Amino acid sequence: MKNHSTSTASRASRAILASALALAGLGLAAQTLPVKTPAKFDELVSAAKREGELTVIALPHDWVNYGEIIQKFSAKYRIKINGLNPDGSSGEEIEAIKANKGNKGRQAPDVIDVGLSFGPTAKAEGLLSPYKVATWNSIPNDVKDTDGFWYGDYYGALAFEVNRDVIKNAPSDWSDLLKPEYKGKVALAGDPRTANQAIMSVGAAAVANGGSFDKVQPGLEFFKKLNSVGNFVPIIAVPGTVASGETPITIRWDYNALSNRDKSAGNPPIDVIVPKSGVVAGVYIQAISAFAPHPYAARLWMEYLYSDEGQLLWLKGYGHPVRFNDLAKRNAIPADLSAKLPPASAYAKAVFPSIEKQDAAKKFIAANWDTIVNVDVHKQ
């Protein structure tokens, strides 16, 4: 038994050494790979294929066309994708990394897609591994970490998704949501204490009511009033609750609302309305876990997402990809995709809060939602 154990340990040591040498051959380290893109892309592909799997988290297939993105990546590289908690929030993604630091199984996420404000804090906590994709230089500097720990992926603006079978007179601005005709009909698409989409919605309500991302209390006061008049529905809205009429007015990112509109195909008819005031745009970011069980597949995933192919797939799902300007300059955007986007005039006064402002707003909203609004937002 002792000799068998020694033999097993010896084989394991040789395997670890061989793995380390293979990593060194790619110019990458096992846990925290260098920021520099591998010299040979085909070597990264081969290493990722040997891993054979990638674990993602909080990526609903109807969110910015992730269903097609996942399918095409998996087919192209023959890598199985495991999806964790598809309806999870940005906060839950971060917690999943923390909870699975020593887990090399499928419960540990390799990559995350979270709100902009979560990037710097996750980096500061040592939860991310740096990496720069081949198209790094075409990602705007103000939405990426200088050292490559996180980088913007797509953006959109908050809008009202309205089921017109239930709502005959659609709201055009935030103040309309307080009308008696919308009693029990207005919902958020997340928990404002943890979900970036809902946090940004509260911030947008603040902007529309004399506040800002430096002063978000007016947003909390707005939702307190929305709740007190009986219009707020404390259910986290999903496409099914919009279609059923349980949450016929939902505040969510325009790309998700537009995607739901297309998929409903008129049953029910859905309108997507960018409000007249309080137009807030937000950027989401990608990052690789510092404890990723599949570090090569994670990096190959990033290369795919930031290639022209991946960027256009996001655009197909109505998310403005972070390399949009580069694609437009090179005439790489198909005309049929451009035609489906909302008019630019709807975004003329859009506010893009900085990371610092988002982070401060996130902390204030999370700390004060229960005391000011005093309503539990939960999954159905």
Image (spheres, grey):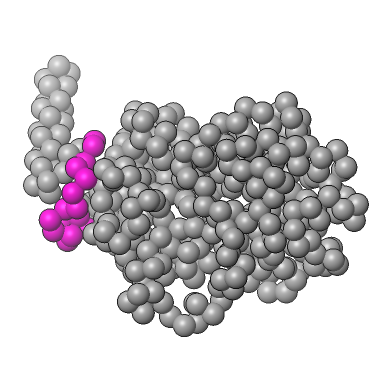
Q: Residue at x 75, y 37 (%)?
A: 221
Of residues 188 and 265, the one nearer the viewer is 188
| Residue 103 showing in the rendered view | no
Q: Quadrant of residue 191?
A: top right
Q: Main secondary structure of the magenta part?
A: loop
In-image side of 2 versus 130 (left or right): left
Q: Residue furthest bottom?
A: 335
Q: Residue at x 84, y 63 (%)?
A: 166
Q: Residue at x 34, y 69 (%)?
A: 326
x and y percent of residue 241 in the render?
A: 74, 54
The quarter of the image holding the C terminus is top right
x and y percent of residue 99 in the render?
A: 44, 29
x and y percent of residue 273 in the render?
A: 69, 64
Q: Residue at x 39, y 74 (%)?
A: 328
The residues colored magenta run 31-46
Q: In the rendered image of this protein, does residue 121 appear above or below residue 81?
A: above
In-image side of 195 versus 110 (left or right): right
Q: In the rendered image of this protein, does residue 214 appear above or below residue 279?
A: above
x and y percent of residue 124 in the render?
A: 36, 30
Q: In the rendered image of this protein, does residue 372 appear above or below residue 275?
A: above
Whether 33 is among the magenta residues is yes
Whether 80 is among the magenta residues is no
The quarter of the image holding the N terminus is top left
Of residues 55 and 217, the one nearer the viewer is 217
